[in-house]
Image (spheres, rainbow, N blue to C red):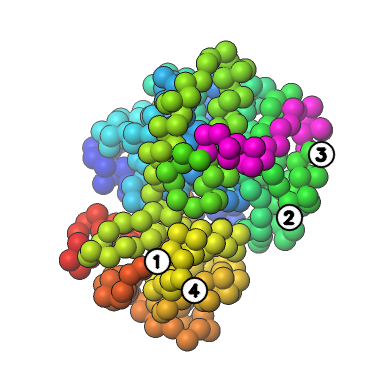
Amino acid sequence: MKLRNFKQAEEFLALHIPKSSQTIFPGELGLERAKYFLKLLGNPQEKLKIIHVAGTSGKGSTCYLISSLLASQGFKVGLHQSPHLTDVTERFQINNQIISKKEFIFYLNKILPIIKKLDGLTYFEILVGLAYLIFYEKKVDYAVIETGLGGKYDGTNVVFRSDKLSVLTKIGLDHTNILGKTIEKIAFQKASIINEKSQVISIDQDLKAEKIIREVAEKKSAKLLFISRGLIYQTLIKHIGLIGDYQKENAALALATVNYLSQRDGFKLDKEKIIKVFETASFPGRFDIKKINKKKVIFDGAHNPQKMKAFIDSLIKKFPNKKFNFLIAFKKGKDYQDMLRIIIPWADSVVLTSFSTKDQDMINESVDPAEIKLNAKIIPDLKKAWKYILDKKEPIVVTGSLYLIGEIFKLIKNKQATNI
């Protein structure tokens, strides 16, 4: 069997999307399966310089900025992130350019016989293995890899080189049903990407998270650097074009990461090129302002209270003395009540809607909007909800889930939304 086109490739991958919670998060069993899969692929991940990023908030933006900064210095950089917004090929980028569908099909066909040898291999595990293989075959200088969930048993945690650089973004409460109910338990899962005798760089953390990170680093004989964004504000970060104060924190962490690599690997940083990266940086779905129907629409994939607070704080700073018209939906299992408490004081109106994705690492469905006890307009059909919110006055805000953002971006991309 050979996949002849992109549609067939998507259909093949869909067969590997987990259907139950046991297969979605298989823990140690899943990690061992991922390791064996990579072994059959020739362990390409062990032939790459890896920057491995874990955390609760800011992983995607930090990965994007690290990749952009390294590319600006003349390096060839692979970038793997999840979830994707509209297209699975977004997970395979070289110097922040998505690979073509033709290339994607070529590489997937290349590993098809190996995939068929393994029982239970998941969508996420296949794509992670594919990313490592593509980056190796394209001879990237660095590969920036975002964890999917947690760290310890994540399918990306298959690199054992001591020169793997671990990067930890802000850690908070999220996925508590899987990672644990406390900051300490979650921090342990995230910090478990740290390799023996390696280097780890972390943003300033909650004291409970910091304690765990220090313990894990000490146990692994790893060198640990905590960075304060305040130290970097006075230099290059003032140039950042990404909107949102929380993005300055991500930028500080990315800059510290690239600065460390320049010292370790012996290359000099071109300050002007770094400034240009920060001035022109833009990241889809993160404080992403678009003009639609001649109105400002702000998209942000905040999906836990920590992210939502950071987003709303930046929103009211950007648009002072304003109230907003919100279109929101939350993935099942998320702490939507705390997120609503953060949103409501700044809402002129709220429209609750729903989504269901069938082209991601798992089937993702939203909370039934009728279950959310809130005096708000309920429009379960996302296409109708999108059309309705566009008739509201600006600023319009779409938030609550990256999956919601992705589904709306598809509507815009396919020109199915009204007057787009």
- Cβ atoms under marks 3 and 1 closer than 8 Å: no
- Cβ atoms under marks 2 and 1 closer than 8 Å: no
Give the amino acid at mark 4: Trp
Q: In the image, which disc is placed on residue 397?
A: 1
Q: In the image, which disc is placed on residue 215?
A: 3
Give the amino acid at mark 3: Glu
Q: Earlier in the sequence, mark 2 or mark 3?
A: 2
Residue located beneath label 4 in the image: 346
Residue 214 among magenta residues: no
Splitting the image into 4 quarters, where does residue 388 fall?
Answer: bottom left
Select label 3 or label 1 by which is in front: 1
Give the residue at x 61% y 24%. 260
Splitting the image into 4 quarters, where does residue 107 fall?
Answer: top left
Q: Magenta segment, which residues?
A: 215-237
Q: Residues within 10 Å of mark 1 (few under 14, many from 20)?
A: many
- In space, the residues marked 4 and 1 are separated at their CA atoms by 11 Å
- In space, the residues marked 4 and 2 are separated at their CA atoms by 28 Å
Residue located beneath label 2 in the image: 183
- Image quarter hosting the C terminus: bottom left
Residue 230 among magenta residues: yes
Q: Viewed as shown, does residue 85 lie left or right of 26?
A: left
Give the residue at x 52% y 71%. 343
Observer able to see residue 4: yes
Task: Give the structural element (helix, strand or loop) at label 3.
Answer: helix
Select label 4 or label 1 by which is in front: 4
Q: Residues within 10 Å of mark 2 (few under 14, many from 20)?
A: many
